[in-house]
Amino acid sequence: MIQFCIMAGHEGRLRPEKKFYVTLMGAQEMTRPTLAKQILEHRQREKEGNVTVPRHYFLTIMGATEIKAPTLAEEFLDMRELIHQGVLTIEEWDRWLPRLGRTDPSIASFTLMGAFSEWSLPPESTEIDSIALQRHLGNIPDHAGELLQMGIGQRDSERWAVLRRAVHTTV
């Protein structure tokens, strides 16, 4: 499937399907799936015997493409849901985390007179607002919310350690 963004803007989510993104004199902002969704998708592919990872191709000409990480609140809610449903245990998550990694071999890009960012974090204000909203709605307990706030601006292992600790407090 091909997605065009020409002299416009687009904001969306990366899906586990082969896709070609073309950005011409525009801006495209994509959000990666949460770790929980990635684990489910990888498990499903393994069950089906499909070891190939769907590739995403990005062609950016005189524009900007950014692939962002999901917010910590999104990560927390998805992961907690998987664990509470019994689909995943904390120990299994620990085994999956190194396999998923930060660098995604399924992303290829070509950028000409533009910008491409493969791994950017959500802005601090977005992270704070999403945690505050979910705490207000009662979806994130206060203690877990405080822990998640320590992960704002953190990358990779620091981010995942904070997330794991916050999820572990609610199990």
Image (tube, grey):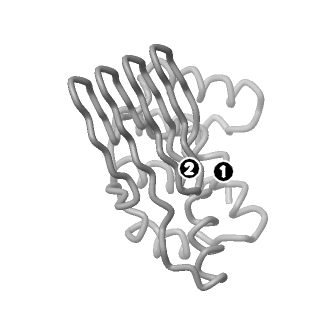
Q: Which residue of the protein is positioned furthest toward the left in this rendering?
A: 113
Q: Residues within 10 Å of mark 1 (few under 14, many from 20)?
A: some
Residue 8, horizontal then vertical, whole percent: 49, 15
Identify the image quadrant of the C terminus: bottom right
Q: Which residue is mark 2?
A: 34
Name the disc covering residue 78, or none. Answer: 1
Secondary structure type for disc 1: helix
**Which amino acid type is marked by label 1?**
Asp
**Which amino acid type is marked by label 2?**
Thr
Comparing labels 1 and 2, the label whose residue is closer to the camera: 2
Residue 25, horizontal then vertical, whole percent: 37, 17
| Left or right: where 12 falls relative to 27 | right
Q: Residue at x 42, y 23 (%)?
A: 123
- Observer-nearest residue: 102 or 1? 1
Q: Residue at x 51, y 38 (%)?
A: 31
| Sequence-wise first label, 1 or 2 | 2
- Observer-nearest residue: 99 or 82? 99
Residue 24, horizontal then vertical, whole percent: 39, 23
